[in-house]
Image (spheres, rainbow, N blue to C red):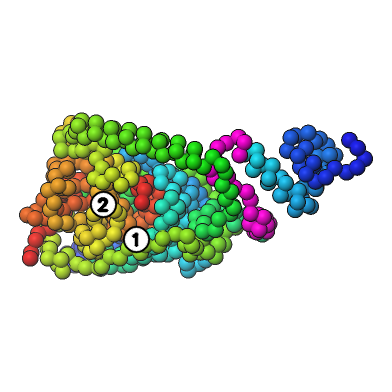
Amino acid sequence: MKRILSWVSWWLIGTCALAVQPSVALAAEPDVANWLMRLHDAPRQRAYVGTFVVSAGNTMSTSRIWHVCNGSQQIERVDALTGVRRSTFRRDDSVVTFWPDSRTVVRETRESLGLFPNLLQRPDANIGRFYRLKRIGHERVAGIESEVVQLEPIDALRFGYRVWTERQSGLVVKLQTLGANAQVLEQAAFSELQFNTPLAFHQLKVLMENTQGYQVHSPSARKTTVAQEGWALGAGVPGFMPVRCYRGVDAADAGVDSSLQCIFSDGLASVSVFVEPFDASRHVRVDAHDNLSMGATYLRVRRLQDWWLTAVGEAPGSTLTALLQALERKK
Amino acid sequence: MSDKLPASDEWVSALMDGELRGEEFAQAVEVLCDSPQARQDWDTYHLVGAALRSRSADLRWHDPAFMDCLRARLADADAAAALADAPVALPAVQAVTPVRVANDGWWLRVAGLTSVVAVAFGLWQGWNSLGGGAQLGGAILAQRSTPAQPVASSTLVASQQDAAVMLRDPRLDALLAAHRQHGGVTALQMPAGFLRNATFDEGAR
């Protein structure tokens, strides 16, 4: 009888252990996802006006921000206070940028803004697999009581993040990108923030739509895939999945309009890989061994036969190099 | 002062010369508000003063219709609108009427000569920098691919072994801008990522 009781007790312990094990694993993952969802929903709940400061490498940029929401939609205006004058308006995923000096307006739809939270709900969503959420405590930022959370990467292939969110709504008020040994590579924060301003949705909408006296450009980019363009991705980098590919991205006046841009992301970090035909007159300036960076944004290049590949993204240089090495020409 | 009320142009003249105080000052301002003729005199005196003080070729006086419209619009504006109505899309309406003055030719000649000197200085500087060849281990300092391209402000740091150099290249800046534009596909994108990208100084267009 003793032996039977002993066997039953061990069986019960084992069963409980098996039952507990998956629930622990499941509990960790939704925590990151839930926290991110709250962060994403916050701008839909609160209107605010503030001054935003971004510090990356040796540069510091400032902007003035007006944000209004009406429950389902949100609209905001970002006036750059540093460098060339420009005002960027965003209404959900529609973005209009005014360049007053050149009397130019760029009107575009940024699908990337609408991708989240769908990105979290994909079967291959793996933010919880590659980052651990750690609550740090409380701090005041721009006069706002905020919670501090750290997203720690599980390996050296991605950066960490420290995020300050307003306690009531979860709005991000400060964000740091952390390199090895928690070194701050880049930070963005409100230096001043006021909630519940009397701005009305339609006031910003009228300003956003008033392009009179401006020349309006609408850059066109054709969606494509890595395979359609004759490329294949080998082993790649754990966690980084192809998200979007564009052909004909009209980014600026420096000859990238015909290049292929493929975006890879692990959910938090993103890397763009640009593919162009090799041109000796333009592409020899940067060497494959150059370690180029600006704040948390790194850049790596690779020449592959008649092609010139450039990886740009908020990830360590070794990750960019691995992504470039994983691309193979098929056609 | 005589018992007879001065004409409106005398009020305006005295006001401009700073001769009025107290009651007389208040009366002059009242005249200015009530009389279109007085306001025109006010504009004319300012225009004459500006013409005497400067040799500008582009002196203008106010368009009364525009000023009336502006006053009406200002009266309607509320505090909230003032927060958001820093001029972004200025309508292509000229607010002033141009008046040409006699020293046009002189000004144009000076402007032309100044431009020639500026271009010559620029060419001389450009020639010197080309000769200098600011190249360091494959990285190029202050490289500009086309003269028309404005200076982009993104500065990449190129670390090669133990050395670190600053690298500015319009083409790399364009790639950075394209990445910020289309590559921000992260869970932290909204709202901090978008604000970060919109705040970044991307140089001129």
Q: Which mark is residue A54?
A: none
The residue to which callout 2 is attached is A254
Q: Main secondary structure of the magenta part?
A: helix
Q: Which residues are magenta?
A: B51-75
Front residue of A304/A103: it is A103
- Asked whether the viewer can see residue A81, the reply is yes
Image quarter in which the N terminus of chain A is found: bottom left
Q: Residues within 10 Å of mark 1 (few under 14, many from 20)?
A: many
Outermost right residue: B3
- The reply to the same-chain question for discs 2 and 1 is yes
What amino acid type should be assigned to the residue bearing mark 2?
A: Ala
Q: Is B73 colored magenta in this rendering?
A: yes
Q: Could you say where residue B87 lies in the image, as x and y percent from the top left?
A: 53, 54
Q: Nearer the viewer, mark 2 or mark 1?
A: 2
Q: Could you say where residue A120 lies in the image, as x and y percent from the top left?
A: 31, 64
Host chain of mark 2: A
**Which residue corresponds to the image point at 44% horizontal and 64% vertical from the top-left?**
A91
Image quarter in which the C terminus of chain A is found: bottom left
- CA gap between label 2 and label 1 equals 39 Å
The residue to which callout 1 is attached is A33
